[in-house]
Amino acid sequence: MQQQKQQRNRLLTVGMLVVASVILLTVGSGFGETVGRILIVPFAPLAGLLTGGANGATGLVQPIEDPVELKRRNLDLERTVAGMQIELVQLREIEQDYKRLSGLANYISRQSGQTFVTADVIAIDTSSYLRWIIINRGARDGIAEGNPVISDLGLVGRVEDVAANASWVRLMIDPASVVNGRLQTSRAEGTISGQLQGGLLMDLIPQDIVVQPGDLVLTSGLGGTYPGGIVIGQVASVTRQPAALFQQADIRPTVNFADLEIISVITSFQQIDTSIFDQNLQGTPQP
Amino acid sequence: MSLQFGIPLMLVAALIQATILPHLRIYSGQPDLVVIIVLAWTALDRGQEGMIWAFAGGLILDVFSGAPMGITSLALVPITFLFGVTETQVYQSNILLPLIFAAVGTLGFHLIYVFALRFIGGVSLVWWQFLFYVTLPSVFFDLVLIIPAIRLLTPWYSRLHPSRVRF
């Protein structure tokens, strides 16, 4: 009797929780996003601290690579060296930050008429199936949905959602990401989509275009979702089948997505609203 | 699991999963710390706590994700339900059984998650890539960590529920 009651309660609980999950998913993505935007506000500083700690710890173990070598040294010198090593690690961290920031500053200074907000990466998507990051700047800093995100090496992705003090960025390597790109040498255009392994695939390249490994790929600006001329990567290999309408190219991104720490958001970029064309395609009468 | 123990535990686990664990990836898979904790707690508990923490933990994970809010809970709650039911009957008979159920549980979680991501999240998938690069490495991680997680949580569980039968 008791067991039957427990079983009934268990079934009731699982049913209620599944229904609650489905309601969250289907009542409208807006509700779930709002919940996320509110919950991220207290978590963002914590995530920033943890990320900073993880990066610091990674740096701390780097110089102590050869303990045997250290043992050979004089005892007096060892103490001095240990102190200097800690200082060295800190200086290396500062140097890395300086390099990234100066790279960004160089890039930003070349882009006249655009405004940027620089941000730290504070979290990486908890789902292994998606390639998103969370940054420590949000609506308070002028970031809006659709803003392109870059690093000193090229295009990173796009802001998809914004909270007060944090933003969610879909990386270019996310399986659902699509960017319109252009080959620098031939000016041929195509669509570039993310691959789970971390690479990019450029599709819809016309068959008559000669594509060479090493060709540089830039954003084309078509579609109005990204500004034109931002570096995406280099052609790694080309797949060309005589029977196919288009050829494909594997693109090696210039940005190392596993090592993203500081990025810039182009806040002045106005995304073009193309929904009017979608309505026309669906047969909505034109005004 | 009491609120004052469960909420901080889930928060810390989700923060670690969003900040430190992505650096340990094999291919594209990483340990699902929250999932491991929820499954380990379900293995210890005879009641419905596992399901409730699956729901709460899933929501916390989704805050740090681009996936639609609720998708992780949707994948995790049914698995903890099945995990809990089976556990009641057979866990105490063999130490290897939790390992087998953990493998089946995490695999089931990933499959439901990917399915929901495809049909609710609208993410286009190449199934074999997802399976090879993410699901299998993640299941491997979870499998390795589930027994230590059960061992680590056992003292906490016995402190919170001294009257219940221990794993």
Image: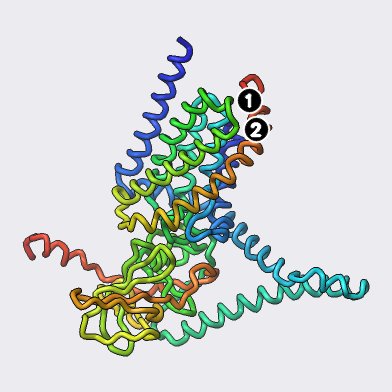
- Mark 1 is surrounded, within 10 Å at the Cα level, by few (under 14), some (14 to 19) or many (20 or more) other residues, namely some
Callouts 2 and 1 close, C-beta under 8 Å: yes
Q: Earlier in the sequence, mark 2 or mark 1?
A: 2
Point out residue B24 in the picture as x, y percentages from the top left corner.
57, 59
Identify residue type, mark 1: Arg
Q: Is residue B123 above or below residue A151?
A: above
Q: CA distance from mark 2 to mark 1?
A: 8 Å
Which SS class for mark 1? loop
Does label 1 lie on the same chain as label 2?
A: yes
Q: Position of residue A247 (x, y in %)?
A: 25, 77
Q: Quadrant of residue A142?
A: bottom left
Q: Residues within 10 Å of mark 2 (few under 14, many from 20)?
A: some
Q: Residue furthest bottom?
A: A185
Mark 1 — residue?
A: B166
Determine whether A42 is above or below A144 in the image. above
In the rendered image, the quadrant that contains the N terminus of chain B is top right
Q: Given the image, what chain letter belongs to the residue carrying mark 1?
A: B
Q: Is residue B90 above or below residue B128?
A: above
Specify whether A109 is left or right of A20.
right
Q: Is residue A220 in view from this perspective?
A: yes
Query: A225 or A92: which is nearer to us?
Result: A92
**Height in image: A239 above or below A13?**
below
**Residue B154 marker:** 2
What type is the residue that disc 2 sits on? Thr
Which of the labelled discs sits on residue A172, or is there none?
none
Front residue of this view, candidates A256 and A32: A256
Point 45% across, 78% down: residue: A254
Left or right? Give the position of A2 relative to B11: left
**Left-right relation of A70 to A262:** right
Residue at 45% from the left image edge and 9% from the top image edge: A1
Which residue is at a point 70% across and 70% down the rendered structure image? Answer: A62
Q: Position of residue B44 (x, y in %)?
A: 58, 30
